[in-house]
Image (tube, rainbow, N blue to C red):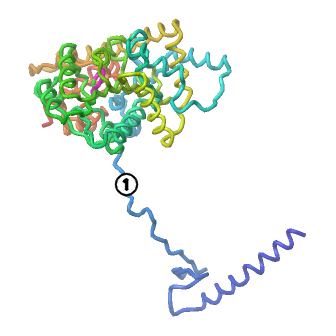
Amino acid sequence: MGSAILSSASIFTCRPLLDNLKANSRLATSNQTTFLGKDYIKTKSFTRTSMTVAVNVSRFNDVTMAPPDPILGVSEAFKADTHEMKLNLGVGAYRTEDLQPYVLKVVKKAENLMLERGENKEYLPIEGLAAFNKATAELLFGADNAVIQEQRVATVQGLSGTGSLRLAAALIERYFPGSKILISAPTWGNHKNIFNDAGVPWSEYRYYDPKTVGLDFEGMIADIKAAPKGSFVLLHGCAHNPTGIDPTPEQWEVIADVIQEKSHIPFFDVAYQGFASGSLDKDASSPRLFAARGMELLIAQSYSKNLGLYAERIGAINVVCSSSEVAQRVKSQLKRIARPMYSNPPIHGAKIVANVVGNPDLFNEWKDEMELMAGRIMSVRRKLYDSLSAKDKSGKDWSFILKQIGMFSFTGLNKAQSDNMTNKWHVYMTKDGRISLAGLSSAKCEYLADAIIDSFHNIS
């Protein structure tokens, strides 16, 4: 009965529409017809009349196409290349000698522990997993450090290094309005985006010297001295990205002197602790130096590299304060910023870190695996240098490659030379000349050396 009523209703509803169509189809004076109050363009064919609905202009018509990401776009181009010798040296992601992604054994063990315990997926507090926050602050400073013992560190779990930097940038914009942040020239490609979007003004301090392919220490110090009093100074804790050039321990002391003299606030980005040298303590020495001087500072952390947790987006923002009471207030405001931004951080990566750092056996296994990963990168760095030195008869000094540290090497190649690396040699890299040694195998070092020598000497 219901079906019959529906059919009858449909007929009565559609009949006026059909009549209207028939009436309009007999009009030959115009190729435009009106149907239910809308304009249609009518075109004749041998068998039927076809109609096209006039397209309304989009309300998003002024939205332009964004340029591809300078780093992530490299991977897309690499995937489309079918050349057998192609190399992806763009994204800083660790690969095995077979150039395959690597999941740490200790990570798998930590995940098995989570499965055995049958842990739930309830929301974390806004500040994140308590066990993770405790473990990550202690890993950064050392459990016996005064800033830990006196509870002067405000730690909030963030969405890896990027999200942690973004939280800190929002804190700066809100409580230090108009303050400028100094960023090294060059720096990681996303730093400027983060501070731009947070509304924090920035300027650059000299860092890389193209003449020596080393650190422009005098320029760096001069620019930090010239900055307005109370500026924030963004520093790479270790394995500077993209150059791989770090200050010496003596130079770090001078940098700390100048920052203290100018009442600047140091802001460390620590993305490679333990992954650069193979030692967790050595790679954390620079922020520990500043904390030992009693300075207030910010430190963003990431576990993408040293635990291979790229997709878990696990990191933290730490703010070292003058007292525990100030740290509590800073933490409350970081939570207030996080709440409308993403509400609660993810739990899986946080539990992996807490399990690894909090379990003595897993912690020792992790340190062993980090030493192996760091050792493989050091090995291909040495082999690349040896290959360049043996093949290049021009007398050029390639020793800067050995002086650099971490997963990147700043080759000194310009944009045209980097384009030649990709177009001719199928070596994918960023246009500033940075290559990721984590994506290089010993077997392809000689091939890469040929590409670099050709690009350096034959492309201006």
Q: Please provide percent x and percent y for residue 155.
A: 44, 25
**363 and 339: which one is in front?**
339
Q: Please provide percent x and percent y for residue 138.
A: 43, 15
Look at the numbered disc 1 and give the secondary structure of its residue: loop
Residue at horizontal 40%, vertical 12%?
Answer: 142
* Neighbour tally class for label 1: few under 14, some 14-19, many 20 plus, Cα within 10 Å: few
Report the predominant secondary structure element of the magenta stretch: loop
Q: On the image, which quarter does residue 28 sit in?
A: bottom right
**343 and 178: which one is in front?**
178
**276 and 343: which one is in front?**
343
- Residue that carries the numbered disc 1 in the rendered image: 65
Residue at horizontal 41%, vertical 32%?
Answer: 164
Q: On the image, which quarter does residue 199 sit in?
A: top left
- Residue 416, compared with residue 66, is above or below; it is above
Residue 107 magenta-highlighted: no
Quadrant where the N terminus sits is bottom right
Residue at the right extreme? 1
Residue at horizontal 34%, vertical 48%?
Answer: 67
Task: Examine the rendering and report whether any part of residue 81 can be seen.
Answer: no
**Three-letter code for the amino acid on which mark 1 is drawn:** Met
In the image: residue 324, left or right of residue 349: left
Residue at horizontal 31%, vertical 26%?
Answer: 268
- Residue 47, compared with residue 383, is above or below; it is below
Q: Please provide percent x and percent y for residue 336.
A: 48, 38
- Residue 24, compared with residue 180, is above or below; it is below
In the image: residue 192, left or right of residue 49: left
The magenta region covers: 235-239
Task: Examine the rendering and report whether any part of residue 76 can be seen.
Answer: yes
